[in-house]
Image (cartoon, grey):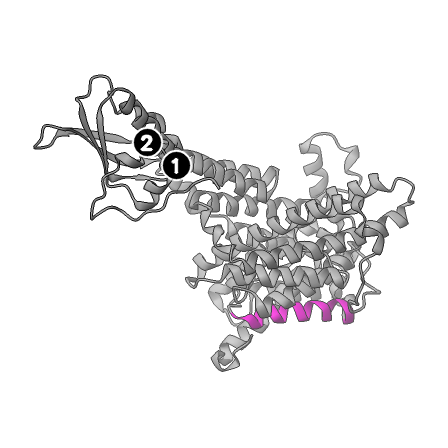
């Protein structure tokens, strides 16, 4: 919750002003993501309000902005197609109603899954995402944010144009005023903070340019052209339809809910990590999981779609001085007030201003330093960075991050798939293999290659002091090697294995010597 005693007058001002900026920027985003999901803009606006409100109070990172997002909305597209196939007899209006209720129940279940993940303290697994994958995620998301703005600059009747050059020419000739406004907005956000930081540059751009466009009657696309916001009311409780609890419906809802939950958590926890790096203070991943889950479940019960953290708006808030919970709280409250009470004002905001702000967010989000680092990175890390960036742009955030983790894990396994042995003889002329390196599934072959069972003397010692048995594959390899020495009629002694490892061994157990300085590591075994 808020601790007002820790707030100075400057903190309060910065949080309220940056929250106001974010509230305005949330409106077109929520509307756009609703269109992607195939539902009314109100569903996205309600989701942005409810999720933003709950995570602002309970979330794991003060000032982080959550709401309806494109990564989650894309998942709902496939849900809508599945619902259409399940109910082919419904007309368009009835089908939209049914899709909405499927989305609401999916949001509730996804939220419950996220709460469970948070309570089980599984949010820490975000640490498994390697730094190159994090850079790739951020860079890919920056590109996605920029590309998402291009649809606002498309010429009307775009289908009549052939080739990118024709589309670009038509866009400039038809939307040249929008391009001028975008340039002015970006210039304001770039240079105004160098003069004064008393008011967020993005908010100045919105207010000034909206007034100029309104009073000078400049013909340009405004938010009101995207959706009808004239009859928006406060959200109310919407109970799930009873027919959605059938087996057929659940076969669609539950898999989608799992994907929504995982995509939402990945994006939220990665956003939290990005803000941790920017601010230097570490947030709580598990707390964010619970807060996001509670927000999504509540959103589904009150007519809103599921969502997650929004890296673009979070960075807007952070760079505008909104570092406390009051900023994200202000953003959510002002959002619903603006939409319900001042829909006419919101409808008058030029879309080009918001596009300009998001272009600057994209530039600020992109890790340009990672481009310089690529040539100094190991080739495997550079490959992960590039692959994650490409997959984020063309496929999906969750797929990109999972691919980055898998590639990094495989590279790690390949690099460490060697175990070495130094050979010498002790005072009793016994041959000693002194192993060095990890013994796990990837290094088993290398382990076998170190030994010469046929030509070894009658007494052999294998010393594991500088080695570590990592998994059951490693323990199995020790058993296999021990069996070979046993069949050859040679005496084998195994030194410096952990008690845990000795318990796992089936054949080699009797050949283990028990040293006072045996290690205490645990072996990962399949249960």
Depth-wise, is mark 1 or mark 2 nearer the camera? Answer: 2
**Residue 99 image point, x, y percent:** 81, 49
Q: In this view, does 315 lie to the left or right of 213?
A: left
Please give left or right for residue 492 compared with residue 34 in the image.
left
Quickly name the residue at label 1.
412
188 with respect to 174 (left or right): left
Residue 174 magenta-drawn? no
Q: Is residue 65 at all visible to an observer of this figure?
A: no
User: Residue 153: percent from the left, percent from the top?
Assistant: 70, 46
Q: Where is residue 387 in the image (x, y as percent from the top left)?
A: 51, 36
Q: What residue is at 39 percent from the left and 34 percent from the top?
A: 413
Crowd rating for badge 2 (residues with CA inside 10 Å; few <14, some 14–19, many 20+): many
Q: Which of 407 and 34 is in front in this view?
A: 407
Q: Distance between the residues labelled 1 and 2?
A: 22 Å
Which residue shows up at 76% across the image and 70% down it? Answer: 342
Prevailing SS of the magenta stretch? helix
In the displayed orientation, state which residue is furthest to the left. Answer: 427
Q: Which mark is residue 478?
A: 2
Residue lying at 51% horizontally and 54% vertically, measured from the top left: 122
């Amino acid at each position: 919750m808020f601790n007002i005693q820790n707030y100075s007058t400057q903190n309060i001002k910065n949080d309220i002003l940056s929250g106001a900026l974010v509230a305005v920027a949330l409106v077109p985003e929520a509307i756009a993501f609703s269109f992607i999901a195939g539902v009314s803009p109100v569903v996205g606006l309600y989701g942005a309000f409810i999720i933003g409100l709950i995570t602002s109070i309970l979330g794991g990172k003060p000032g982080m902005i959550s709401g309806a997002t494109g990564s989650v909305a894309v998942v709902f597209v496939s849900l809508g197609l599945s619902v259409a196939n399940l109910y082919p007899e419904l007309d368009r209006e009835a089908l939209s109603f049914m899709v909405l209720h499927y989305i609401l129940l999916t949001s509730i279940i996804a939220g419950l899954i996220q709460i469970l993940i948070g309570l089980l303290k599984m949010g820490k697994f975000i640490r498994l995402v390697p730094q190159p994958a994090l850079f790739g995620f951020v860079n890919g998301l920056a590109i996605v944010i920029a590309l998402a703005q291009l649809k606002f600059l498309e010429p009307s009747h775009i289908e009549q144009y052939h080739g990118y050059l024709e589309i670009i020419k038509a866009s400039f000739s038809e939307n040249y005023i929008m391009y001028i406004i975008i340039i002015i907005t970006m210039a304001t956000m770039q240079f105004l903070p160098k003069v004064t930081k008393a008011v967020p540059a993005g908010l100045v751009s919105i207010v000034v340019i909206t007034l100029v466009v309104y009073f000078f009657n400049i013909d340009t696309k405004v938010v009101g052209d995207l959706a009808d916001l004239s009859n928006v009311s406060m959200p109310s409780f919407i109970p799930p339809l009873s027919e959605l609890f059938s087996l057929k419906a659940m076969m669609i809802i539950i898999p989608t809910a799992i994907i929504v939950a995982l995509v939402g958590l990945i994006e939220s926890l990665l956003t939290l990590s990005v803000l941790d790096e920017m601010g230097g203070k570490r947030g709580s991943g598990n707390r964010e999981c619970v807060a996001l889950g509670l927000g999504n479940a509540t959103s589904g019960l009150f007519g809103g779609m599921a969502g997650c953290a929004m890296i673009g708006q979070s960075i807007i808030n952070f760079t505008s001085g909104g570092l406390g919970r009051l900023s994200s709280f202000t953003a959510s409250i002002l959002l619903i007030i603006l939409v319900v009470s001042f829909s006419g004002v919101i409808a008058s905001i030029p879309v080009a201003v918001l596009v300009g702000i998001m272009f600057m967010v994209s530039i600020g989000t992109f890790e340009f330093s990672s481009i310089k680092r690529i040539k100094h990175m190991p080739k495997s890390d550079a490959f992960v960075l590039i692959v994650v960036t490409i997959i984020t742009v063309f496929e999906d955030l969750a797929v990109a991050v999972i691919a980055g983790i898998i590639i990094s894990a495989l590279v790690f396994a390949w690099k460490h798939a060697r175990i070495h042995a130094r050979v010498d003889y002790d005072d009793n002329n016994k041959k000693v293999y002194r192993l060095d390196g990890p013994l796990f599934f990837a290094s088993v072959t290398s382990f076998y290659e170190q030994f010469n069972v046929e030509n070894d003397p009658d007494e052999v010692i294998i010393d594991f002091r500088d080695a570590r048995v990592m998994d059951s594959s490693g323990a199995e390899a020790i058993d296999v090697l021990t069996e070979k020495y046993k069949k050859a009629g040679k005496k084998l002694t195994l030194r410096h294995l952990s008690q845990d490892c000795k318990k796992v061994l089936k054949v080699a157990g009797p050949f283990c010597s028990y040293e006072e300085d045996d290690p205490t590591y645990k072996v990962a075994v399949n249960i």
